[in-house]
Image: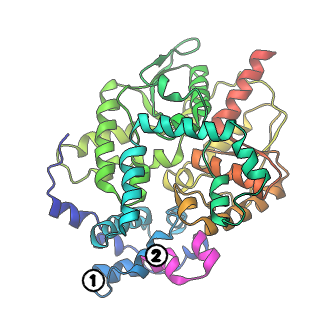
Amino acid sequence: MADSTTVSEAAQLDRPQQQDLDRCVHCGLCLNACPTYRELGVEMDSPRGRIYQMVQVAAGRMPVSDTYQEHIDLCLACRACETACPSGVQYGKLVEAARAHLEQAKPRPWHERAARQFVYGHLLVSPTLMKLAGHLTALYQRTGLRRLVRATRLLKPFHRLEQLERLMPPAERPFFFSQIGRTFPAHGERRHRVAFVAGCLANVSFSRLNEATIRVLQHNGCEVVLPPNQGCCGAIHVHAGLRDLARKLARRNIDAFLDGHYDAIITNAAGCGSTLKEYGELLEHEPAGAQRAHEFSSRVKDVNEFLASIGLNRDLGTLNITVTYQDSCHLAHGQRVRLQPRQLLESVPGLKFKELPLADLCCGSAGVYNVQHTELSMSLLEKKMQMAATTGADTIVTANPGCMLQLRAGAELFGRNQRVLHVVEVLDEAYRARGER
């Protein structure tokens, strides 16, 4: 669907809008909720401080400088400040707009532009390139090369590279791409017909999670359809300020899903779900696309949210595990889905649930934040694992693939090698345990 907004109009729209900036009353209640402020204690690295800078830039009193870019880029965009804010400031919208403005107003060095163009413009949107990257990753992980690198501490002199190696996503073959286009029947009577958003990286690194999600939905009377023309949701592009690319991906997904007459459009990735639910905002200035975008977004449900709303099939087996739950930021703060994952976990017989202190404080993953700001990300992760240790849980559960990668690294580096699972993987194990009885 073509965008009728001109380039100059888009440039004006893709920046913080005055009516959004004016909602901040600078009360400071957001400060303690902000991970970067808690770590650094710097006002300009708090939501209030960043909004102050946005106001100054918008008024022409401050240039779009390296310093401004540094403070905006250092934000995790976890949106915890939105939960804390009494004035209803849409901080996520503001920081995404600020990053889009930076992309227009302050060109990055050529090597950064080239890297971003490859990752965002080619790799994440190309199943062929994703498969190639997955096969290369599998070669590294399964030939013994990874064990050798870690055992010999070969990367120790290159501290950041050693940290990044720990965060490398796994390659789970067979990849999930082969399932896109299929329809999976409900187990027993069909109660719902839903579409499933497979994602991009998840098709390589979380193939088993996607399969578990489909099985759990089937156990709950859902016919699950994977529309063939779907693709990357664009969440990571929005967070990086690449809104034009995100709009292109949004239009593709709207066309792929909207006319299928599904009861719901399901995602198991909290970060993706937050953006999918905000397609209407992303395309709000396109007369032809805004209505379809809002209609699409109204059907999007996180898998936890959906399962809790339809009444979970409680024909579950016993799991003798102790679990704690880490809130995924974009589920808790972006989508305001908090109770449902806990309710689902507590429905599993034998499972002991322990609440995690500061469960909704960011783990440091935040899309590609752990790659771009590794030291700060690791500091947040270490504190998260210290909190997890106080629960005595042998399993840490969350609701977003990016958080899972981060927490798995944390369990190995700072924790007690706890298992890290998605909520639906716990449910899948419980359904399997029932079947084995």
Q: Which residue is mark 1?
A: 59
Closer-to-camera residue (369/333): 369
Q: Quadrant of the C terminus?
A: top right
* Side of 11 where 309 appears, left or right: right
Give the image's coloring scheme.
rainbow
In the picture, the disc for residue 421 is: none
Disc 1 residue type?
A: Ala
Q: Position of residue 296 (x, y in %)?
A: 34, 38
Task: Look at the numbered disc 1 and give the secondary structure of its residue.
Answer: loop
> Does residue 229 sit above or below 391 in this rendering?
above
Distance between mark 1 and mark 2 Cα atoms: 19 Å
Query: At x 33% / y 70%, what residue is drawn?
Result: 102
Q: Mark 2 is on which residue type?
A: Glu
* Magenta-highlighted residues: 34-51
> Can you tell which quarter of the image residue 13 is in?
bottom left
Question: Residue 436 in the image: x percent, y percent?
Answer: 79, 16
Q: Is residue 287 visible?
A: yes
For this orientation, the residue located farthest to the top is: 188
x then y, percent, for residue 290: 24, 46
Does 132 sit above or below residue 87?
above
Q: Which residue is mark 2?
A: 70
In front here: 375 or 137?
137
On screen, residue 118 versus residue 158, left or right, reads left
Q: Main secondary structure of the magenta part?
A: helix
User: Alpha-carbon neighbours of circle 1 within 10 Å: few (<14), some, or many (≥20)?
Assistant: few
Residue shown at 75% from the left, 47% from the top:
148
Q: Is residue 306 magenta?
A: no
Q: Is residue 327 above or below residue 85?
A: above
